[in-house]
Amino acid sequence: MGRLANKVAVVTGASKGIGAAIAKDLAKEGATVVVNYASSREGAEKVVNDITKAGGKAVAIGARVENKDDVTKLFADVKQQFGRVDVLVNNAGIYGFAPIEAVTAEDFQKQYGTNVLGLLQVTQAAVPLFPAEGGSIVNISSVVRTGLANATIYAGTKGAVDTITFSLAKELAPKKIRVNAVNPGLVATEGTADFLGTDIEKDVVAKTPLGRIGQPEDIAPTVTFFASDDARWVTGETLLVSGGVLNV
């Protein structure tokens, strides 16, 4: 029996990349996984099919985390189908890079709307569905939280994610809900494809003690650890999963 047997896990932004790997790893440990997606229903259904073929349980439910009505409906569906949430992974996120002179209010609103407001709205809707024995929330942050040239908005959102993690860990502790963050380095996904094979990748690899960029499967097991009772005495932590990169 897996570490997450009989648990219900919701993973936002799980139709591809890191989110998909997380969904599969949670399912492998026995969780029933809600594979949330914003636009790629096909991608989410493929993740569900991969999970069910491997003997796991999963459903795909669409919702844009920045849209309050979508989030409300998402968790109404979760409540109707499963009655509770034991694990929430706030993975949905977007990024954009631009020099300060090119930063716009639209850029700010788009990235903060998904990466920060979306995380808050999803957490707000999920908390009432956690059982009395509590559970786990895992936020996906980034090593970029320390700052990166031309990434003022994105780095700001991830710095906010870390700070929110610390705050929620204290706020939700009386409900026995643990809150932690995983901070990946550069990971090879559909979203980072433009960086692969470029000087950006070479620069990151040169800074990485373990000598390579990450794969989604490098990130997922750490999320599963935080989600499981193995981390029962861990809350308010941010963990770099970056091959040894401390900052970029």
Image (spheres, rainbow, N blue to C red):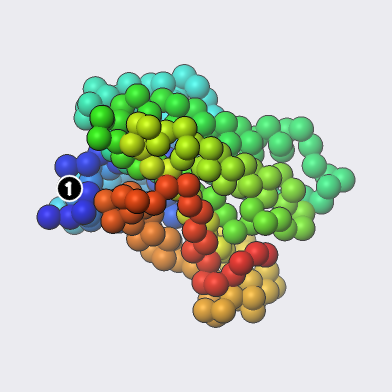
In the picture provided, is 31 more to the left or to the right than 101?
left
The image position of residue 32, as x and y in percent, is 22, 42
Q: Which residue shows up at 59% across the image and 59% down it?
A: 143
Q: Residue 236 or 68: which is nearer the viewer?
A: 236
Q: Amino acid at mark 1?
A: Ala
Using the rendered image of the protein, determine whether residue 188 is visible from the camera's viewpoint.
no
The residue indicated by pointer 1 is 5
Q: How many other residues sit within 10 Å of disc 1, few (<14), some (14-19) or many (≥20)?
A: some
Q: Position of residue 236 (x, y in %)?
A: 47, 47
Give the residue drawn at x 64%, y 56%: 144
Answer whether residue 226 is visible to the viewer in this image.
Answer: yes
Residue at the location (22% across, 26% down)? Answer: 83
Nearer to me, 186 or 1: 1
Q: Residue furthest right?
A: 101
Q: Residue furthest left?
A: 1
In the picture provided, is 181 more to the left or to the right than 156?
Answer: left
Name which quarter of the figure residue 223 lies in: bottom left
Q: Is residue 195 left or right of residue 106?
A: left
* Quarter of the figure that contains the C terminus: bottom right
Say which of 247 and 49 sits in front: 247
